[in-house]
Amino acid sequence: MVGASSSWSRALVQISPYTFSAIGIAIAIGVSVLGAAWGIYITGSSLIGAAIKAPRITSKNLISVIFCEAVAIYGVIVAIILQTKLESVPASNIYAPESLRAGYAIFASGIIVGFANLVCGLCVGIIGSSCALSDAQNSSLFVKILVIEIFGSALGLFGVIVGIIMSAQATWPASTA
């Protein structure tokens, strides 16, 4: 049905770019917090279970929980950056191609950051879980696995960097006075 009024392309053009921007900002922070919570859940449950055998691991393995919490902070930072990209546009220019591009850029940036941080939270949580379990068995493994956990947490930073680069495309049309 080419040219029908119910086509997806027509629907996407009729949605306000501010709506796309708001959804992108919400996804950036919401999915990042979900990734952090999931990682904390995975790490925390293993940490508590392994601490029964070796109580000494509790305090030093909290670094894994802190790495998971950093994922949520990445989402908050990007949401603030994306929020500052919003500008007021006259009603006559709200559906201009430049406005639509800005809305889509903020939306895409939010999706990239949110889902990169979701995967990062899971990665750090799983590695933190294995770090706690292996540290309970052999304390010499802690630093070795912690290095791997640092590399896993870099995935979230990559998502933040890509999101910031993508949000640079968000330029709204200038107001005509």
Image (tube, helix red, strand yellow):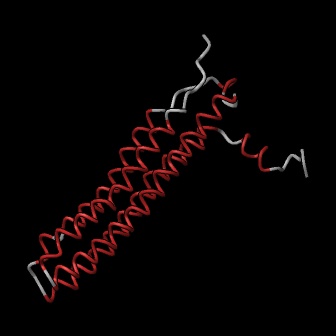
What residue is at 30 percent from the left and 62 percent from the top?
68
Q: Position of residue 72 (x, y in %)?
A: 35, 56
Left or right of residue 91, residue 122 in this image:
left
Q: In the image, is residue 159 above or below residue 153?
A: above
Q: Position of residue 12 (x, y in %)?
A: 72, 45
Q: Position of residue 123 (x, y in %)?
A: 37, 67
What residue is at 8 percent from the left and 79 percent from the top?
56
Farthest residue toward the top?
177
Q: In the image, is residue 71 above or below residue 92?
A: below
What residue is at 14 percent from the left and 82 percent from the top?
138
Q: Position of residue 117 (x, y in %)?
A: 41, 57
Q: In the image, is residue 134 above or below residue 73?
A: below
The quadrant in which the C terminus is found is: top right
Label tally: 0
Left or right of residue 8, residue 56 in this image:
left
Front residue of 175 and 116:
116
What residue is at 23 percent from the left and 61 percent from the top?
66
State which quadrant residue 137 falls in.
bottom left
Left or right of residue 48, residue 158 in this image:
right
Farthest residue toward the left?
56
Q: In the image, is residue 78 above or below residue 101?
A: below
State which quadrant residue 134 falls in.
bottom left
